[in-house]
Image (cartoon, rainbow, N blue to C red):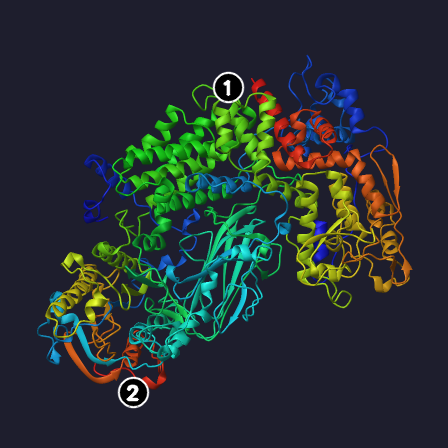
Amino acid sequence: MRATDQDIAPTHRHDNRREFMRRDFLRRLGLSAGALPFVGNLSSLGFAGSTQETTARKQRLIILFSPNGVVPTNFWPDEEGELTQFKPSLSPLEPFRDRTLTLHGLCDKIRGDGDNHMRGIGCLLTGIELFPGNIQGGAKTPAGWSSGNSIDQEIRTYLQNNPQTRTRFGSLEFGVVVPNKANTWTRMVYTGPNRPLTPIDDPYQMFQKLYGQFKDRELLASVLDVVQEDLQKLSTQISNDDRQLLDEHVTFVREAEQQLQAFDQEQSLHEVPELEPGVRDENSNMPKISKMQIDLLVDSFRADFTRIATLQYTNSVGQARMKWLGIDEGHHGLSHEGDDNQDAQDKLTRINHWYCEQLAYLAERLDATPEPGGDGSMLDNTLIVWTNELGKGNTHTLRNIPFVLVGGGLNFKMGRALKYPEVAHNRFLLSLAHAMGHPIESFGNPDYCGDGPLTGLS
Amino acid sequence: MQFRHAVYEKSGKIISLFFCLLCLSDRLPCHAGTTGQQIYLQQCATCHGEKGEGDTGECPDPLVGDLTLTDLIHFISESMPEDTPEHCVGPEAEKVARYIYANFYSPLAQARIAPARVRLSRLTVRQIENTLADLARSFTAPDESTYATRKGPLELRGSRGLQGDYYQSHNFQTDQRAFQRRDTTIDFDFGTTRPVAQKGHPVAQKGRPVAEKADGEVRSSDAKADPSEQKAPPNEEAKEKEVETNFSIRWQGSVFAAATGTYEFLLETPNGAKLWVNDHQVPLIDAWVASGDTTEHRAVIRLLGGRFYPLRIDLFKHKEKNASIRLKWLPPHKTEEVIPEHVLQPDLVAPTLVTRTPFPPDDRSTGYVRAHRISQAWDEATTYTALEVARRIVDHLATYTSLPQEEVEREARLRQFCTTFAHRAFRRPLSKQQVAFYIDRTFEDTQYLELAVKKIVLIVLKSPHFLYREVGFKPSAANLTDATDHFDAYDVASWLAFSLWDSLPDEPLLQAAATGQLESREQISEQAARMLTDRRAKAKLYDFLLQWLKLDQSVEIIKDPQQYPQFSVKVAADLRTSLGLLLEEAAWSETSDYRQLLLSNSFYANGRLARYYGLDLPIDASFQRIPDPAGQRVGLLSHPYLLARYAYANTSSPIHRGVLIARSLLGRRLMPPPMAVEPLPPELHTGLSTRQRVALQTKPPACQTCHMLINPLGFTLENFDAVGRFRDNEEGRPVDTAGSYVTTDGEKFQFWSVAELATFLAGSEDAHLAFVEGLFQFMINQPVAAFGDDTLRVLQQSFADNGYDIQALLAEIAATSVWRVRSLEQQKE
């Protein structure tokens, strides 16, 4: 439980009651293979916490997406080589400068149906063409879904096939204010051709997925006393002939309670975080939702629910209105303004700065979390890749797609700015797979994988 | 039961026969010489009473206990009779011990001889599901009268269909709406052009606008919709041409689910489309992005039977060359089909809460659902269901409470909501103590308002006041509210609602209870009559009829493809619809009459059935009533669905047909056959007819105990083959339909045709009693004997007095049972 959640609670009341509830919530319910089937499908949870001594180092990957390109001059470091200072958009990464790697010169070379925004997001992690379809963007030809799976799902399948690296979910797809429309612009992750995955942009839904069963148990535990009392009261009012039935019922409820208490007594392996209730899924809550999602993501890593995650902010052509930065215009609209519109350039720089702050917060949370059962922090064992569907908004270029990497999870040599001579981004996707122990020969369209993984990363 | 399902194994080979024993009232083994009973009466009864009831001066306690039989023998041998134990030892002691044990000593014997009584019961699975659905509806759609039935079966009510709004743009722009019309089914191939409103246009459409009213349905502005009238400037012709083929269509309405179960929906389109079912927000199928060659999209959803559910489809065509769409489904008991027009209607209804938690099935060991036992699995299922509902309500709190997030009085309003929720769930107003216990305490103990609501929903749905029915309480403890009688008017309201609807009382019922309008027998009968106009009563009766005919379990009817090449799953599904129409005609029409079930000369057919059964209808005809020209079919006994189902893959089965008549229609008790036997294969007895083979195989005396009753009933239906087609010969041999029945009073009746058998059954008092008893137990979930020895007779008399009106019987059972149970409960001490 985090104090901040309580501080911004909209409906909480008296402080003394808060204290009461705090204790109530601190009665965490642990995990066990016990009798209540809430834990029925949590079989892989046994991994967490119990066998770290003997298992190999955990490697994790997070892909963070923000849309509409960047302002290159305020984004990319000027010099190749050691990272000595950041441009304004990347300045929030200053505390992690020695653990950051920027990759300039990666190009999304996939062509075919769909406009650049569509291919930008649809081919970003898949490295392969979109199917022809009925979604019309700014290009002549409409398009459908991607014709291949995305790299995170490729790696997920690889990890899930190995009992040593298998986790409860395999991967988690987080979103922040993603429009409630399934189309080529809103989907980045694919399990296969024509199989887009919907990012979960509602923290409550994600929470339900991660902890629903834990919370249900907790909720149940908090009412069982009343339920029992209710039954017992009524039991005394039942005629003798029928008493047996209610007595039996009381027994069942008592057994359920005893099982819950047994969980309680075992030391909980997973702290169940608490979410502030009632945060609605809307643009103005974006900072709050972003933080909630990042916290859940870090929690899910700590519990080893997954080692692969994506975090998608809005969507390709996303129209976030960052009023909390004093920016009233929509992001995509602004990104079309010419380079000479200084106001727009400034605002776009600040928008990317804000996204970079989210990245920095994620890195900070991981850095502050000791690796469970291992050495160093979780950041030492995690790589975050921040990327985008375009290189630059007003030209819609798919050249120089932003790839900013933070963390030590894939053993890349960090603290550097690398520049590549217009190489296909498929090669970087290959690098991710190889560094996660999955040395595939090609990924996506093999025509763009000719030279193998990127050189010079590690 | 066991004997039935084996018949329909696809192999058609493994089946069982009926070495049945009539259920004998005397369970005693008969020994030569002195019996246990004789010994008991001689040596024991003076003290213990004739039936071990005790209550004599010598021995006040009844002779019951839990010793094993061996221990009991030993005990008697050693110690009984008390003063002269040597009078009863060895084999004599064993005989008498066995007698005592079997007849009244053991717990099993006690259960057997205990007088029937109305027992405290929980809600049945069906009642929980319906109650939760209606409880939720009372908040989300309080004004919607979805349950009012219209007269006549849906299938025959003429074209209904969905409302379609057609737009000349790909994105449903309001100012681009071209026309509106009703479409009977969603099955269109628009080709490369836009759909147009009028008939006779070049677009190929398999679906069609509603026929009889098409002109009226189409709006006057439609004329403008014809794109050919819109002249584009010449220089923009190319662009205009491309744009012209864009369009979008929104179909809305609702779909009727007849049976409870899983429905699979299929959307076939090369274009972008979404389908919503029972949810206004989240689509069941999202195929908005057409991509690659995928054109078929499937999804499943669980629906409760007897209700309409909102349905909407959005379709758009943009740059694709062609446009087409087809909406199909696979309902329980049926086959995959384009959703037929009779289950669609253009009115949009509110969604229904359908919980997903599976419950362990209710106990049906006595032939009908009883709910006087619980299990750990049941308790867990109630927990999951409660959690499911609690989550749903809190996730959609604004919908359930109509409260804006910013409401200043939020806490007070939420407390009010919770109180109302508990009131409806408990089917009675809460006492002050109850409000304090369930509502106030939880709000005070909980930090977040939403969490408090969640907890209260959970507590209420786990409460015995929600989970249990209204009998079994001590008179002194009647005060569930502050001051009411034992089994008060609210209990009467609940009893009526569960009996007739399997759901909670509606507002008028609760009102009547609150205002003293549910006290007299007349008032109760009035309410029961009113409740019959509700769709839920009809759904319940329909489910009874299916159970009565043992058709409630889904069974695939497979026939030998060599012998019956045209008999398909489609024919079987059509037959089920056809039988449903016959049941509805006899049971739910203005002239509801049990006898018509057996005597009606109606047969309902569509084109496909007509072709298969040799009737005169166009092949694409929809269902309609056609009189049987040859007069060969009489009532449901000759309905091909029953005949085909109670038959083998390639021959009829007089045994299965006979068992159905004996058990379901005449209420005779038959034990299951003691062993499974394969029927004699026809190919090894080529000289014998089906009738002769059956007679040969069931000839042994052990078989005849039951088969002397079963066979002659089934033989009467030998005019109908394994698919229910009429025949007067079987492979060249004339069919012998002579049959007979001996009543329990020993009176013998003979029949030579299905018509004579049906006439006998329609007039048989035994059959009437069996029907009344079956319906009673289906509705009430308690043994009828518990309501007084004469209950069945009284109900049967009123059934006869009302001209065998089945609807009136429904109301009569509800009213009589509640009237009697109220006085039974109020007499308790």
Q: Which residue is mark 2?
A: A451
What residue is rendered at 78% in x and 66% in y? B563
Q: Where B82 sits versus B536, above or below? A: above
Residue B603 in view, yes or no: yes
Q: CA distance from mark 2 to mark 1?
A: 88 Å
Q: Amino acid at mark 2?
A: Asp
Residue A48 pos. (x, y %): 32, 58
Q: Which label number is shown at residue A9?
A: none
| Residue B256 pos. (x, y %) | 55, 50
Residues B569 and B315: in front is B315
- Circle 1 sits on which residue? B485
Quadrant location, the C terminus of chain B = top right
The residue lying toward the viewer, choosing from A117 and B361, is A117
The residue that appears at 28% across and 37% down in the rendered structure is B410
Name, please, the residue furthest toward the left. A84
- Give the quarter of the image for residue B450: top left
Q: Is residue B297 left or right of residue B676?
A: left
The percent coordinates of residue B281 (x first, y second) are: 40, 54
Callout 1 secondary element: loop
Query: In the rendered image, which quarter is residue A344 located in?
Result: bottom left
Label 1 environment density (alpha carbons within 10 Å; few <14, some 14–19, many ≥20): some
Chain for numbered disc 2: A
Q: Quadrant of residue A160?
A: bottom left
Secondary-structure class at tag 2:
loop
The answer to whether A287 appears left or right of B311 in the picture is left
Marks 1 and 2: in contact by CB < 8 Å?
no
Query: Can you see residue B314?
Result: no
Please, what is the three-letter code of the amino acid marked with disc 1? Asp
Query: Does residue B264 sit above or below B349 in this rendering?
Result: below
Residue A361 x/y as whole percent: 18, 61
Which residue: 69% across, 44% down?
A: B585
Q: Which chain is disc 1 placed on?
A: B
